[in-house]
Amino acid sequence: MRKNSVTNKLKFYSVLALGLILLGCFAKFVVPFNPDAQDLGIALAAPNSIHWLGTDMYGRDMLSRIIMGAQTSVLATLLLVCLVSVLGTLLGVFSAYKGGAWDMVCMRVADVCVAFPGLVFAIALASVLGGGILNAVLALTIISWPKYARLARGQALVQLAQDFVKAARLDGTTGFTLLWRFILPNILDTMLVTALLDFGTLLMEIAGLSFLGLGAMPPTAEWGAMLSKGRSMIQTSPWTVLGPGMAIFFAVAIFNLWGEAMRDYFDPNLKRGSKNV
Amino acid sequence: MLKYVRNRLILLIPVLLGITFLSFALLSFTAADAVDMKYDQAGIEVSEQVKTAARAKLGLDQPFLVQYVNWLGKLVRGDMGTSYISGKNVFATFCSKLPNTILLAVSAMTVTLLVSLPLGIYSALHKDKLGDRLILIGSFVGNSLPNFFAALLLILIVSVQLQWLPIIAGKGWQGLILPTLTLSLAMSSRYIRQIRSVVLTEMGKSYVLSAHMRGISNRTIFYKSLLHIVFLNVITLMALSLGSLLGGTAIVETIFMWDGVGKMAVDAINMRDYPIIQAYVVWLSIIYICMNLVADLLYHLVDPRIKEVN
């Protein structure tokens, strides 16, 4: 019974989250208006029957821009999550297997990358690289991979000490085959759950860099950048802030719930929230 | 204990070298040539000879590593050059803004603790009751709101709708309220969930069960055993959230025009004032590392079970 409800929850949130990702992929075909078409005659129109979420300072339809923003925000986050989890896992597993100097160097580099507080280094790096959503992704990759490398390394060390791995090694299995067939499959669920739990946070961080003008460049529709544009008009046209803000909030909430459902599915004994530091 | 402190300090050296090197490399590659930048920004056309002479004077013709060592030497003495824009000493500028950021961070941390300790514990002790549900929903919402949107929402509600506070409230205590609330919203949400789950995990352990069976009251068990564990976890949490707190101030300070190092950095980014950005990255990281060390030592002091490894 309990197992069933956990599975159903996972299915439900998976559909929502994948729906959001698909919306990002096919945003172009869903938008009611051209998101870049300006019409100064209707600039800053309040939400009405034609423009459901109002228009921005150039008369562009907010709803269309928010849907297009899903493309930038969600797909960029997806790219970032894939980059850090794959890169981190491979480096971590390889470090655990190799040991010695490689392990030492890799982990010290990881120490340095996480020694910068929060977004501080990403802000500096993105400013040096000069804006653009891909540069924001790159900057966040550099500060986020160590978490995955450390986790994967720890998990791999546990696996490497197991009897079945020792038996495989005695059998002559080494290198790539050993890691691919015996180590990776056993740590994959942990890495997947961690990646999904981070999805929402990373989405907020990308939007945060864009908010500071270090992510998506105009006229690209991106939620953080739209919020930043709407900021100066908050007193007169609050919908320019509320629309993109709620979009980020719902996206983050869906991805957080998806991650938690995935965690409960793989590890039903775990108490709610205990892994969420 | 002394041995542990010494080992931790030794481990700190490669990390400090690493972050200073990265910060130096990052900005010296891009600011590619400080001389070009300076003349460009001053709007002066000069011949190559003048530029070469200026480069030699600044030591930019030397090998990269030599430049780094020179830069590091100056850094230790508190000399980080002058701002491209204002022409003022960078380190002095940083130091003049730092107290504002520290004030904001400390007040956010205080509010977070005042909110999350009682709510987290209440939530755990009344598991699955209405209050617990509401607190959990609230903390989930707080956790999913990015700080820049939370800040704008607070402005919209408190300043625009209710008109309790001016939008730009300036330097006084009035200006501190909204940024503090913004920063502590996300932090309290995380703390509440963590404190709740710690209390629940501990209450499921056998020593609590046996205390129950001996007829010891809930209240006594809580104050004599559980509270200690909760405090230990709060120390860890504080150390963990320090990074996002220091980094998060950049966005929040910018929105509320709070005159701290975060706003200084964002302004500097918009004006390509690289020496200021460099000072921001290097010094915030050093502060962060030192605070983490303090948290580790504190944890070590409070919990004697942690073996002196490393």
Image (cartoon, coloured by chain):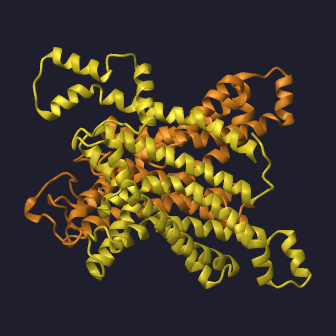
What residue is at 63 percent from the left and 45 percent from the top? A191
Q: Is residue B135 above or below residue A197?
A: below
Q: Is residue A199 above or below residue B198?
A: above
What residue is at 73 percent from the left and 35 percent from the top? A183
In x, y percent, where is residue B110?
A: 52, 69
**How many numbered marks does the figure carry?**
0
Lateral position of residue B226 relative to residue B13, left or right: right
Relative depth, front residue between A244 and A92: A92
- Asked if residue A1 can be seen in this view, the reply is no
Q: Is residue B158 above or below residue B50?
A: below
Furthest residue toward right? B214
Lateral position of residue A137 relative to residue A239, left or right: right
Relative depth, front residue between B300 and A221: B300
- Which shade of the palette goes to chain B? yellow
What residue is at 63 percent from the left and 33 percent from the top? A107
Furthest residue toward top? B49
The image quarter in which residue B151 lies: bottom left
What residue is at 39 percent from the left and 16 percent from the top? B63
In x, y percent, where is residue B3?
A: 75, 42
Question: In which quadrant is the N terminus of chain A drawn?
Answer: bottom right
Lateral position of residue A262 relative to residue A231, left or right: right
In x, y percent, where is residue B89?
A: 30, 42
Instruction: Please give the letter of the chain rendered in orange.
Output: A
